[in-house]
Amino acid sequence: MKIEIDKLISHLKSQGFVFQGSEIYGGLANSWDYGPLGAEVKNKLKKLWWDFFVRRNEYNIGLDSSIILNPKVWEASGHLGNFNDPLIDCKKCKSRFRADKLIEEKFTEMNVGGWTNQEIEEFIREKKVNCPKCEANDFTNIRQFTLMFKTNQGVIEDASSTVYLRPETAQGIFIQYKNSQRALRKKLPFGIGQIGKSFRNEITPGNFIFRTREFEQMELEFFFSPNDSNDWFEYWLEKVKFFLEKIVQINKKNFSIREHDKQELSHYSKRTVDIEFDFPFGRGELWGIAHRSDFDLNQHQKYSGQDLTYLDPETNKKYLANVIEPSVGLERLLLAIFCQSYVEEKIENGERIVMKLPYKLAPYLVAIMPLQKQQNEKANQLYKELLVDFDATFDETGNIGKRYRRQDAIGTPFCITIDFDTLTDNCVTIRNRDTMSQERIEITKIKKYLVEKLI
Ligand code: GAP
């Protein structure tokens, strides 16, 4: 089903998933806060990623590094020299754009990655790529605009105190690679995963939470010997596809794989594959898998003067590890999941909006509902028992139809009704969010029932 993004945004706001950032002060452009239910889903998504890529992977370990790093890190990584976008201004209405995106938004099949600024400028002139605001075709030359957020550390505000908010979590991993490897006595191949905030002063943020200036990344840097004959790139590409399809249940039809051509590759990459998702506003990058070779370790070794080589215990030879990096934005993945889950359905007595979230990501797995006040005590007792092991909520207000609609709207997979008969037969009715079918089961069997649904 093709959904309208504005409807989704308004639904997510009214149900407490995502709010406009700083709303009571008129907002802050393109910033979003995660409400009580959004925070739940986000945390669950992080946990699923961490479990799959870190905790339960035979090779990997985790890390939590700082957001502000020694500025030399960004010199070494190439971000201070290369991490910028082509900025262009409309001379007539003074609006600013990313020059490459101006073309790609008009010619949606085109990809101008790797073009020179001159090629972009000529194309904009010749093919009449006009200003989307005022329709003029009179632009300034392109200037490179750095995406790094700058600030100062300490009380003195001069060049010596300049620091940057990290634009990716990856560098924190590279600079702690040796410590992590030594402390955990890891042998190649092994990976280090990290989840954390990244900041980019994007020229054109937008499309809701797709591109923001503050976001979280979930990144894995997988280190292996340059002599290793395994195809680790394919291995991690398959793992990412498995995670998308089986763990967070993204429909295969909604994503596709795109290989970067040589010109498009980032300064550090030997090979990159993007997994793209069909968002309501068009196809967009969801997850990138890059072969970073030994670029980063080599650079950090040069700039820090530290030995970052690995002594191979079998050959007794030293070398720099190569790296495969699967990297995804948490909020971008969340948006894909929200887009896919949001369903408007005609039902017997009207319509319903239902968030068909994977069970493991729903804010609540189960809602407990006493049919009448007389069953409140019994329902409360069950609620407290379930709360020990499951994400449960209690809903006693409004008629039962309204309560079902409310739980559908936030994606609760199961609703348990305690009715008059429960007090004598110790059975309850469980209703399934997706099929709306109901079954009657004994209270003592509920936990087993829910556990089975979560597997
Ligand atoms: N360490 C590699 C790296 O950062 P990237 O392609 O620039 O590579 C990786 O970013 C992922 O981070 C993207 O695939 C996307 O999911 C997410 N991402 C990047 N910029 C973002 C932004 N401004 N807002 C939200 N997510 C973003």
Image (tube, rainbow, N blue to C red):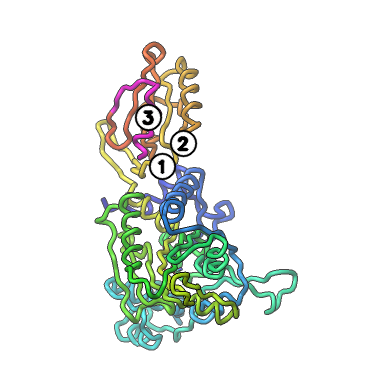
Towards the viewer: 225 or 234: 225
Give the residue displayed 41% in from the left and 33% down from the top.
366
Q: Is residue 13 visible?
A: no
> Which numbered disc covers residue 448?
3
Quarter of the image that includes the C terminus: top left
Spatial separation of the CA atoms under disc 3 and disc 2: 15 Å
In percent of width and height, residue 444 lies at: 40, 22
Is residue 453 found inside the magenta-colored segment of the image? yes
Kind of residue sitting beneath label 1: Ala
Q: Secondary structure at mark 1?
A: loop
Judging by the rendered image, the residue that carries numbered circle 2 is: 391
Callout 3 environment at 10 Å: few (<14), some (14 to 19), or many (20+)? few
In percent of width and height, residue 245 lies at: 30, 53
Give the residue displayed 43% in from the left and 47% down from the top.
12
Spatial separation of the CA atoms under disc 2 and disc 1: 9 Å
> Nearer the N terminus, badge 1 or badge 3?
1
| Quarter of the image where one finds residue 445 | top left
- Which mark lies nearer to you, 1 or 3? 3
| Numbered label tally | 3
CB of mark 3 within 8 Å of CB of mark 2?
no
> Which numbered disc covers residue 362?
1
> Nearer the N terminus, badge 2 or badge 1?
1
In percent of width and height, residue 34 lies at: 50, 50
Q: Secondary structure at mark 3?
A: helix
Kind of residue sitting beneath label 3: Lys
Spatial separation of the CA atoms under disc 1 and disc 3: 19 Å
In percent of width and height, residue 216 lies at: 49, 59
CB of mark 2 within 8 Å of CB of mark 1?
yes
Callout 1 environment at 10 Å: few (<14), some (14 to 19), or many (20+)? many
Is residue 392 found inside the magenta-colored segment of the image? no
